[in-house]
Image (spheres, helix red, strand yellow):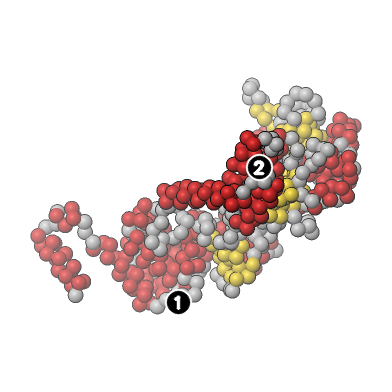
Amino acid sequence: MIPESFIEELKYRSDIEQIVSPYVRLKRSGRNLTGLCPFHSEKSPSFVVYPENQSFYCFGCGAGGDIITFVRQIEHLEYVEALRFLAEKAGMTLPEDARDDETARVRLRVLELNREAARFFHSVLISPAGKPGLDYLRGRGLAGKTIRRFGLGYAPGDWSALLDHLREKGFSEQEMLLAAVVSKGRNGGVYDTFRGRVIFPIIDLRGGVIGFGGRILGEDGPKYLNSADTPVFKKSRGLFAMNIAKATKENRLILAEGYMDVIAIHQAGFDNAVATLGTALTPEQARLISQYTGEVIIAYDSDGPGQKATMRATGLLGQTGVKIRVLAIKDAKDPDEYIKKFGATRFKMLLDASANSTEFEILRIRQKYDLSTDDGKVGFLREFAAAMAALPDRLEADVYIGRIAAELTVSRSALTEQVAALRKKNFRAREKKERRDLKIYSEAVPNQPRDPQRSKYLRYALAEDKLIALLMKNPDYGAEICEKITPGEFVTDANREIFSVIANRISQSLPVDLMSLSSSLPMEAMGRLSYLLASSEARTYTIEEANDYIDVILSFRQTKTGDEVGCMPEDELLEYIQKLASKKK
C-alpha cells in the first residue's frame, strides 16, 4: 500500500494544467481550460480541464478523472507507474514498498534491457564488425553527428551476439523474449531477432528506448523489421523521432514514410519530421500529431503505395482538425532522394509550396481521367462532386466548384446542384446511422459505456448521481448520510461501487477527492465521477437535498412488482396499500 501521506503530498505538488498541457493545447475558458481531446478524434474542443478540483472530462468520449487517471490513459501506464511518473515530475521518490508492483517492475526491466541493447548495437556499428552497416549509412549520406544523434547501430549476422551480451549483463532469456530482441526457435532455443541489419532505436517522448527498427543489408528476410509489441512498445501508438520533433520551433510537422527519410530531413536542418513505425498511420498516431502541431505536411513517397498511404493519412488527420498539406515530390521518389539531388533550400521551397489536402484529392482524381474526352470529363466531374460534397467547409467547396466549372466550361449551377444533392444524400445516410446507433437516456452520464441497469432504473440512478456529487463536495455531510443509507441500498451496481469506496474512506476520516479515490476505482468509474463533478461545478447542496435523494433511492425497496404484490399475504398487502396511500397524501 502506498501511504496516504504520500498521495496527499503528491496532490499538492502536482498541477493538472502542467501535466496535461504537454499533450493537449489548452485555452483558457473562464475558470477552466479547453482543448481537443487526446483520447479520440475531434475538430471542436470538448475536453475540459478543471483546475479547481484538479480533474478533466471529455464531453465527446466520456474520458475523465484526476491527474493519475490522465497519466495512466495518455502514457498507457498502470497505477503505480503513473504515480512514479508524477512523483518524478514533482521531485519526489516513490516509497519502496510500491516497487513490488510486478507490471511496473517488468516495464522498467524491459526499458533497461532496451537501453543496453541500443548501446550494444551502436558499439558494434563503430567497431570493425559494424563496417557493413557503417558503409551503408555513409553511402546514404549520413554524417557521424547524425548517426550519433539518432543512436544508430548495427546488428551483426551472428545468431546470438546480442543474446550473449545481454546474458553477460544479467538479463534472462525470458526478459529478452518480453522485449522481443530475441525469438524462440522450433527446438525451444532462442536467437537474436535482428541479424545483419542497420538498427534504428525507437525512443519515446520521455527518452526511453522502447523498440527497434532494422534494415536488412542482405537479401535474406524482409527489407525492414520492427520490434513486436512489448510491455513498453505498441507500433500503433508511437512515431519515430517524435522525441526530437516535439521540441521544434516550427509551427508544423512533416510526416514522412520511413526512418531514412526522417533522418535525411533532420540532417538537412529540419528538426520537425516524424514517421510511423512500419505501419500505415493509425488514429492514435494522428491524435498524437495533433497534440503537438496545428499543421502537418505529408511527405510520403511519390509511388502508388505512397499515394494510397497519403489518402489514408489525410482522412485520419482531417478528423483531428489539423491543417493538412501534401508534398508533391517531382523528379525524386522520396524526400531523401530529393534532398540529395536538389539540396535543403529547394526542399524548403517545396514544403512551402505544398498543396492542401483538397487540391491533392482533386489532382488524384484528375489523373484517373482523360479530360480531353466527354466521357473523361463526366467521370471526373462525378468524382469531383462527391469529393466536394464530403468537404465540411462549404465555402472552400464553392471556391473549387467555381474553378473547375470555369476550367472545364461546364455550368456552375449544374455542378453546384449535383454537389448539394450528394451532400443531402450523405446527410440522410449519417442521420439514419445516428438514429440506429443512438443510445441516449435523459440526463444520463454522456458517452459512457451502455448500462442497461441504469436505463432500467434511471430515476434512482439519477438520485444516486446527485447524492455522490453532493458527498464529494460536502464530505462533512458524510456521517449523517451514511447513517441513513448504506451502499447495499443503492440500486445500480456502478454507483454502489463508487459510494461504497467513498463511504468507507469517510468512515476512516480519509479524503474523498478524485486523486485519493484513484487507487480504489477503475478508470471508467473515475470518468463517471469526473462528469458528476463537472456537471455540478457551480452547484451548492444542502443536507435537505441529500435527504431527498436518499428518500428516492430507498423508495426502490418499497416498490413492488405486480407479481410480488400478487404473492403477498393479506396482512402484508394491507400494510403496503396503506403506505402507498399515505405517500399520495
Instruction: For marks 1 and 2, give the one nearer the viewer.
Output: 2
- Find residue 311 and name its label: 2
* Left or right of 269 in this view: 223: left
Camera sees residue 378: yes
Camera sees residue 210: no
Q: Could you say which is closer to the camera, residue 498 or residue 282?
A: 282
Residue farthest toward the top in the current orientation of the protein = 187
- Please identify the quarter of the rendering in which residue 497 is found: bottom left
- Find residue 540 and name its label: 1
Q: Could you say which is closer to the camera, residue 55 or residue 193?
A: 55
Q: Residues within 10 Å of mark 2 (few under 14, many from 20)?
A: some
Give the residue drawn at x 87%, y 47%: 346
Give the residue drawn at x 88%, y 40%: 340
* Left or right of 274 in this view: 27: left
| Residue type, mark 1 in image | Thr
Q: Check whether the beta carbons of the residues at disc 1 and disc 2 lie within 8 A of each other.
A: no
Quadrant the N terminus occupies: bottom right
Q: Position of residue 445 (x, y in %)?
A: 44, 60
Q: Secondary structure at mark 1?
A: loop
Q: Earlier in the sequence, mark 1 or mark 2?
A: 2
Give the residue drawn at x 42%, y 67%: 468
Cα distance in 3D space between marks 1 and 2:
51 Å
Q: Residues within 10 Å of mark 1 (few under 14, many from 20)?
A: few
Q: Could you say which is closer to the camera, residue 521 or residue 330?
A: 330
Residue farthest toward the left in the current orientation of the protein = 570
Give the residue drawn at x 88%, y 50%: 345
Above/below status of 224 relative to 490: above
Q: Position of residue 209 (x, y in %)?
A: 73, 45
Quadrant the C terminus occupies: bottom left
| Residue type, mark 2 in image | Met
Q: Secondary structure at mark 2?
A: helix
